[in-house]
Image (cartoon, helix red, strand yellow):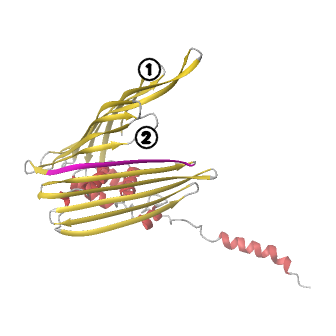
Amino acid sequence: MFRSDRFVPLVIAVALLGLAGLPAARAQAPSARFAFADTTLLRDTLDLHFDRLFPLADSLRVTPDSLRALSIRFKLPLERMVFLSDSLGAPVDSVGSIFEREQFNPLARTVERSTSFHYESSYAPSRLSSTWGNSAIADLVRGPITLHNVTSVTVNRIRTGSTYNFRRAKSAVTETGWRFTPDLSAGARFNVQRTESDQLGSQRVTSNTDVQGSIRSRFRVGKDLTGELNGFGGPFDEPSNSLSSGAKSGIGTQFDGHLQFAGPSWITFDNRGTTNLRIGHATIPDRARFRTRDLKWNARGNANLFPSSPATLSVTYTLSGDRTERASSVTEIVPTGGSFDTVVTARLLSDPGRTAGLEVATQFATNTSRLSITGTLDRSTRLLASERKEGIVIDRTEGRNSGFT
């Protein structure tokens, strides 16, 4: 009598041999054109390619992973980032921030009439959390009048044990302006932000609304020397971020400038700087009220010597300072006789900080080889004031870094 169960081991062995001969499944076929395993996913979803990543990173004097991260963050192809860096005369890591800032600049509009609307939505699930993001960009140009709006809504759901925590962040930035001349405009900016969090049944809502006037200008000092100067100012209202810190409100101003020299000479340079000054009051409800003055500033620039010769020298510097004042309170239980009294101490604290960085790079290039030497020197100092039982304690944090590559 024929028994089919005798052939079961033989059929299983043949199937295993067949599966062993199949090629392994991969998310991306190996290729020398791509440097990372998730390039296929990025190419299909964001339309980003990383061809010639290493040669471009070497020519720009940045690490390949940093260049790739900048491309993903600002959703710009490598070729576009290099083109913008060259046309703007700015470092490649500043292209994204300049690009985001210039989208609100009325002087950057070259058309007389335009109406556009762009909407994006994304959903990123994971095992313990998920993120849903929505953004919309509206642009309106009618002759000298411009209107630009960027609205974004992000919802995060985080799983903690058997419960879910939610966090919603909403922001809308609108700027309108009137171009008096091709190099001068005035307008207003409206910035509305709202954050909602729901953790373990406890809800917390913070909102912030800023209304600022804006003046933008461009000027040309000489044939190859150009600059920009922008100013913003208006009331601000900063809510309290904890029970022990106070809310702040007052008048704030911001100035940023840009000075660039790019000509057929032995030196080129590019300098950018920003200064923020806010004067107001910090208030702890039912406890104290203090006058505050906050000052933040930063400057960054680079100079290139003999940029068109085989031997070049590049100097890059960064400077920044931050002096922020805040109101803080500490609640103590002090024994008095046979009982205990609650004493609340409120004081004005200041947290100054400074950073400085210098990078010097030289490069010698021939038709067949190239030699690069780079030296860096960074230093940062931060003072953090905190209220404790023994009084105000200043914690000093310093960081130093230097080296050659």
Residue tagged 1 = 391
Q: Is residue 191 magenta?
A: no
Q: How many marks?
A: 2
Q: Position of residue 404 (x, y in %)?
A: 35, 37
Q: Position of residue 167 (x, y in %)?
A: 49, 52
Q: What amino acid type should be assigned to the residue bearing mark 2?
A: Asn
First-in-chain label (2 vs 1)? 2
Residue tagged 2 = 241
- Classify residue 51 by image quadrant: bottom left
Choose between 223 and 164: the one closer to the eye: 164
- CA neighbours of label 2 inside 10 A, class few (<14), some (14 to 19), many (20+): few
- Classify residue 54 by image quadrant: bottom left
Real-space CA distance between mark 2 and mark 1, rounded to the nearest whole angstrom: 22 Å
Residue at (45% x, 33% y) in the render: 244
Q: Is residue 202 in view from this perspective?
A: yes
Choose between 385 and 27: the one closer to the eye: 385
Q: Please indicate whether residue 87 sits to the left or right of residue 35 in the image.
A: left
Q: Please indicate whether residue 369 sits to the left or right of residue 155 in the image.
A: left
Q: Farthest residue toward the left?
A: 222
Q: Position of residue 77 (x, y in %)?
A: 34, 61
Magenta range: 201-217
Quadrant of the drawing holding the N terminus: bottom right
Quadrant of the drawing holding the C terminus: top left
Q: Farthest residue toward the right?
A: 1
Q: What amino acid type should be assigned to the residue bearing mark 1?
A: Gly
Q: Position of residue 42 (x, y in %)?
A: 44, 62
Q: Is residue 208 magenta?
A: yes
Does dot 1 land on a helix, a strand or a loop?
strand
